[in-house]
Amino acid sequence: MKFFVDTADLNEIKDLAATGLLDGVTTNPSLVAKSGHSNFIDLIKDICAIVSGPVSAEVAATDFDTMMAEGLYLSKIAKNIAVKVPLTPAGLKVCKVLSDQGTQVNVTLCFSAAQAILAAKAGATFVSPFVGRLDDIGESGMQLIADICEIYRAYPNFKTEVLVASVRSPMHVVEAAQLGAHVATIPPNVIRQLFTHPLTDKGLAQFVTDWAKTGQKILPDGVQPLKTRA
Ligand code: E4P
C-alpha cells in the first residue's frame, strides 16, 4: 500500500519524506489556504522537488474550459504532478483529455461507487473516496472503499487506483489496507500515530535501562554516530 501525505505544509512534507516511507503528496484548496502560502505554483514546485512520487495539485475552476487550461498549466510544473479534478461531468471530461495525453489525474470528492465507476471509465490514475466525511454524516466510508475495490477487481481493464482520502485515524489506514486499497493519503498527525504503541515505549525504556546495567557499548572508541561524522 502506498502512503501519500495529505498536507500543503512544506516542513511536514520534508520531515516525513526523510522517513523514506512517503510515496506521494495530496493537496487541496483548503490545505493550501491553511498553509498560508501565497504562491500556489511555487508551493507545488517546492513539493515536487522534495517528493518524487505523485503530487496532487487541484484545479480551482469548475467549468470545463478554465479547468482544462489550469490542468494543462499545472501538468507542466513537474513530471510527477497529478492534476486533481472534482468528480463532476466537467471534471471527468478534463480527466479524460488529460489522461489520454499521459498526464496523471486524481479525481477527488468521490462519495459513491457509481461515481468511482465513472472516474475509472474516464481514465483516472487515482479516485479519491472521502471516508471521514462519509463517516461524519453517519454513512460508512469503509463500506464505500470495499465496494469500489470489489468493482475495480472485477474489471481488470480499469487501471484506476483507489486512493483513500479524508483519513482520520490509524484504523482507517489499517482497514483500507485490509480491503486492498492501493493508496491512503494521510494527514501528518495520523502518520505519526501509526508509529506509536504504549508497549513499544515501555519495552524500549526497559531495554535501555537493562543495557545500561551491562556497562557495555556497541560502537568501539572513535566510531561516531552518523550525524557527528565528518
Ligand atoms: C485529499 O485529497 C482530500 O482532499 C482530503 O483527504 C480531504 O480530507 P478532509 O475530509 O479531512 O478535509
Image: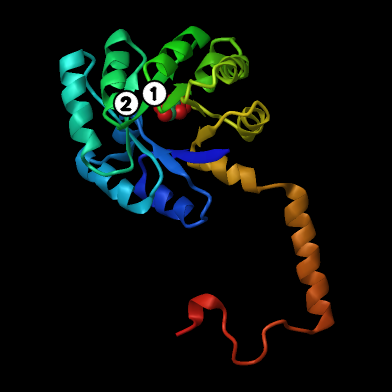
Question: In the rendered view, does 145 fall on the left or right side of 61?
Answer: right
Q: Quadrant of ligand 1?
A: top left
**Can you give x and y, in whole percent of width and height, for residue 200 in the image?**
74, 53
Is the residue 75 above or below the residue 135 in the image? Answer: below
Q: Is mark 2 within 8 Å of ligand 1?
A: no
Question: In the rendered view, does 22 fall on the left or right side of 74?
Answer: right
Q: Secondary structure at mark 1?
A: loop
- Do the CB atoms of the residues marked 2 and 1 lie less than 8 Å apart? yes
Q: Residue at x 60, y 87 (%)?
A: 223
Three-letter residue code for mark 2: Ser
The residue that mark 2 highlights is 99
Disc number at residue 124? 1
Q: Residue at x 20, y 22 (%)?
A: 68
**Can you give x and y, in whole percent of width and height, for residue 92 in the image?**
32, 15
Name the image quarter holding the N terminus. Answer: top right
Residue extending furthest toward the bottom:
221
Question: In the rendered view, does 210 fall on the left or right side of 225?
Answer: right
Q: Nearer the viewer, residue 26 or 106?
A: 106
**How far apart in space, not on screen, are marks 2 and 1 (Cα)?**
7 Å
Q: Residue at x 18, y 33 (%)?
A: 73
Disc number at residue 64? none
Q: Nearer the viewer, residue 225 or 197?
A: 225
**Can you give x and y, in whole percent of width and height, for residue 88 in the image?**
33, 11
Give whichever of discs 2 and 1 has the lower sequence position.
2
Q: Residue at x 53, y 14 (%)?
A: 134
